[in-house]
Image (cartoon, grey):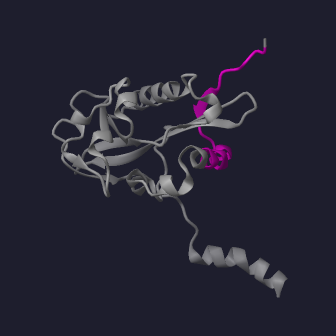
């Protein structure tokens, strides 16, 4: 009998990013995942500090990913947006998705966050305490299925009375300036001339 090593969940590193993107494309399809309303809340933003997770298989490759993002659940009400959660097909049905969820929820609670929102399969996420009743007064920037828009209070009452548009509040991704891009391209342009 072959010994199998369970995937190890850790904080995501820069070295995980390309594998993470490939896993998300495999799980959801690139065009489909980039078209989702939740993606509008993540675009150009960094995930919340200490809340981006990767699970590595026995060979070190990323086999699961989950990130949390800073958002406002209506005016002046901080929350986190969870997603996407993806598990490589070879590692599904082993409890890895649940382990990723538990890790993320526990760490968000430990770091003092009050609530988590997500768009996903209600029966799956209900086992972690997510409920549509907590998002009734909120809406997302684009089309979404209200029966899949769920909330979880990490602090009792964190979403009580929440009303309004969910909007991104996380740190912006550092992008190079036009001058930096031109400077990087100049050596290549001189070589090709």
Of residue 159 and residue 7, the one placed in the foreground of this image is 7
Res. 149 in view: no
> Between 142 and 82, which is closer to the camera in this rendering?
142
* Front residue (pair 12, 126): 126
Task: Name the image quarter holding the C terminus.
Answer: bottom right
Quarter where residue 148 is shown: top left
Is any atom of residue 68 visible in this view? yes
Q: Is residue 84 left or right of residue 11?
A: left
Q: Which residue is depicted at the point 56% across and 38% down?
A: 65
- The stretch in magenta equals 2-23
Q: Is residue 120 above or below residue 129?
A: below
> Where residue 166 sits in the image (x, y, percent)?
29, 51
Number of marks in the rendered image = 0
Q: Is 22 part of what is drawn in magenta?
A: yes
- The residue that appears at 77% across and 82% down in the rendered structure is 189
Question: Which residue is located at x 66 percent, y 37 percent?
Answer: 62
Residue closest to the far left: 161
Q: Which residue sits furthest top?
A: 1
Q: Is residue 184 left or right of residue 67?
A: right
Residue 99 place in picture, x, y as percent: 52, 24
- The N terminus sits in image quarter: top right
Is residue 9 shown above or below 178?
Answer: above
Instruction: Inspect the magenta stretch and tell me whether residue 26 lies in it.
Output: no
Q: Position of residue 140 (x, y in %)?
A: 29, 52
Q: Is residue 106 above or below residue 26?
A: above
When the figure is inspected, residue 76 is found, relative to residue 85, above or below; the finding is below
Residue that appears at 57% across and 46% down: 24
Which is more toward the observer, 146 or 69? 146
Residue 9 % position (x, y): 59, 28
């Amino acid at each position: 009998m072959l010994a199998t090593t369970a995937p190890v969940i850790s904080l995501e590193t820069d070295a995980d990013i390309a594998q993470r993107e490939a896993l998300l494309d495999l799980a959801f399809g690139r065009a489909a995942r980039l078209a989702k309303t939740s993606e509008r809340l993540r675009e150009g933003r960094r995930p919340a500090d200490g809340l981006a997770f990767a699970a590595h298989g026995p060979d070190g490759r990323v086999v699961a990913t989950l990130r949390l993002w800073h958002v406002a659940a209506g005016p002046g009400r901080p929350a986190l947006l969870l997603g996407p959660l993806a598990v490589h097909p070879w590692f599904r049905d082993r409890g890895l998705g649940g382990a990723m969820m538990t890790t993320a929820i526990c760490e968000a609670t430990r770091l003092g966050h009050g609530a988590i929102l997500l768009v996903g399969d209600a029966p799956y996420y209900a086992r972690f305490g997510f409920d549509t009743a907590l998002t009734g007064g909120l809406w997302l920037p684009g089309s979404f299925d209200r029966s899949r828009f769920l909330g979880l209070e990490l602090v009792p009452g964190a979403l009580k009375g929440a009303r309004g548009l969910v909007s991104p509040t996380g740190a912006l991704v550092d992008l190079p300036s036009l001058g930096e891009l031109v400077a990087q391209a100049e050596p290549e342009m001189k070589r090709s001339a």
